[in-house]
Amino acid sequence: MEPEDKRLDENPNTGETPPSDKATAPPDAVPPKESASPSFSAPRMNERKFAHVTRRELLKVAPALVLGAFAIPKFQESLLKMGLGFSDWTSAHLFRRGHMAPTFTDSQVTPFEKFPINGYDVDDPGVIFENWSLTVAGAVQKPGDYKLDQIQSLPRVRQNTRHVCVEGWDVVGRFGGARLSDFLTMIGADTSAKFITLGCADDYYESLDMATALHPQTLLCYEMYDRPLTREHGAPLRLSIPTKVGYKQAKYLTDLKVTNVLEKVGYWEDQGYSSFYGL
Amino acid sequence: MSGAVVEIVRTRGDATEVVGRAVYEHPLPVRLCHWVNAISLFVMVGSGLQIFRAFPSFGAKIPQKDLLHWPKAFAIGGWLGGALQWHLTFMWIYIATGLIYLGYEIFSGNYRQVLFTRRDIPGVWPMVRRYFFFGPKPEQHEAYNPLQKHAYTTAILLGVLSVLSGLAIWKPVQLSWLAWLLGGFHMARLWHFLIMWAILGFVLGHLVMVLLHGWNNFVSMLTGWKKDPEY
């Protein structure tokens, strides 16, 4: 500390005059002798010591600048990827297979005309229903093409659930279909595999974690509002998953694969959206 | 907790001169949390407003009536997916900072400096008179006056509410009880938005007061030491 003292003491030798920036210097700075201090004795600190202490304390706050790494383009992408990955990891652990999404009474359901159709999907991929089948592949005992009536032969589930879009809007809709878990039993899927991947008649594609695929409210949906699925809502078969955000609920399904390896995650996920996005 | 007031002295030969007073007001954990939180709040608000741009309404999607078209220049992330990456990354920093701060305040006893309690109520009116009606300056004996305590305590509560409402719209199924408490997913989204504006209101007032109160106040949040305190 001694060597520093000289530098710190570069105040003018004009005696008691405090540095000019001390506009707030109280009048009690004037008495030159220590005996002039108030009757109670406040602890004292030499001004050099004070300068030293405050500088050290200032440096201790510097670690907060680590967050500046987010401003560096080189690091930004990987840091945000880590953050999103951590969010997905937490989401997967928060997911409880036995926990049901809230269901609603028929009177709480949003009218069919007010159920939004995502602009992206307005383009009809032109599925020819007579020729349609769901092609099953991967870790299953009975791969092959499954017709709609085979899926409809499974117990039909009808549920009023909330559809939440990543954009922020939500509607309560009525969805009908077969449990995906029942279908996985039908095709003899290896449910210890990690993922289900889905292909669509348009260029959309998706993937699901097995826990969500086995959730009892996860449907291979062929009905909305008690009527066969309409084209704009993804006819003849789409996913309805009240525990997932909207973009995970792919329309116009054509392919289903049970797998442990994800080459691609999903149409939006591969552009930067959350992979898990469970609600 | 803030320490005792210290007199800063200059020694020249035999003469010792008191050149100022100072007090250690902000312990290191508080200062670190303050600046980290300032950064995360900036990112959370910016990315949150970009997320809001995807559906700038609180009504139905059909028909959609937009509430406010937030300019892209005042948003972070560039598009919805990018903004969600920022939001879902910094929410952990925001939450962690909040927990560390609250933990520190409780276990160190420093909360006594900040927490607005019943004892502070009588002092509120004189301070309001001082700030808004040019009334006389009430005597101050501690780091924060009653209005400051009220503002900081409210800000901390708003911070907690921003996290809870955010969790409710992130996980309306797994945390359905939380969404239910806030009136469901739809209302929780509105709460989250309103709480953000309340926090921004606090930040605005906070910045104005720091500007008015000057340099020493600002420096104290960096070094911990407040020069020439009013008590």
Image (spheres, coloured by chain):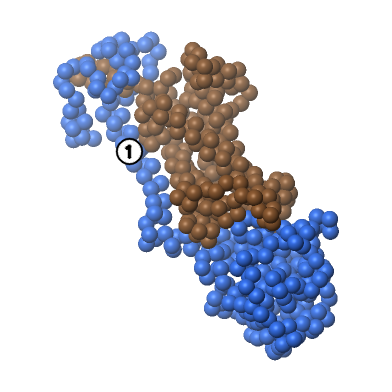
* For residue B30, above or below residue A222: above
Q: For this view, does A86 lie left or right of residue A137?
A: left
| Residue at (50% x, 59% y) in the render | B79
Give whichever of B4, B212 is nearer the camera: B212
One can see residue B112 in this view: no
* For residue B43, above or below residue B223: below
Q: Residue B180 location in percent, x, y? A: 73, 49
- The residue singled out by tag 1 in the image is A56
Q: Colour of chain B?
A: brown
**Label 1: how many residues lie within 10 Å, few (<14), some (14-19) or many (20+)?**
few
Image quadrant where one finds the C terminus of chain B: top left
**Element type where label 1 sits in the image:** helix
Quarter holding residue B172? bottom right
Q: Residue A28 location in percent, x, y? A: 32, 13
Give whichever of B89, B56 is nearer the camera: B56
| Residue at (38% x, 48% y) in the render | A65
The chain containing the residue under callout 1 comes to A
Q: For this view, does A75 lie left or right of residue B103?
A: left
Q: Residue B86 location in percent, x, y? A: 50, 55
Q: Colour of chain A?
A: blue
One can see residue A255 in this view: yes
Q: Amino acid at mark 1?
A: Arg
Give whichever of A134, B143 is nearer the camera: A134
| Residue at (80% x, 83% y) in the render | A149
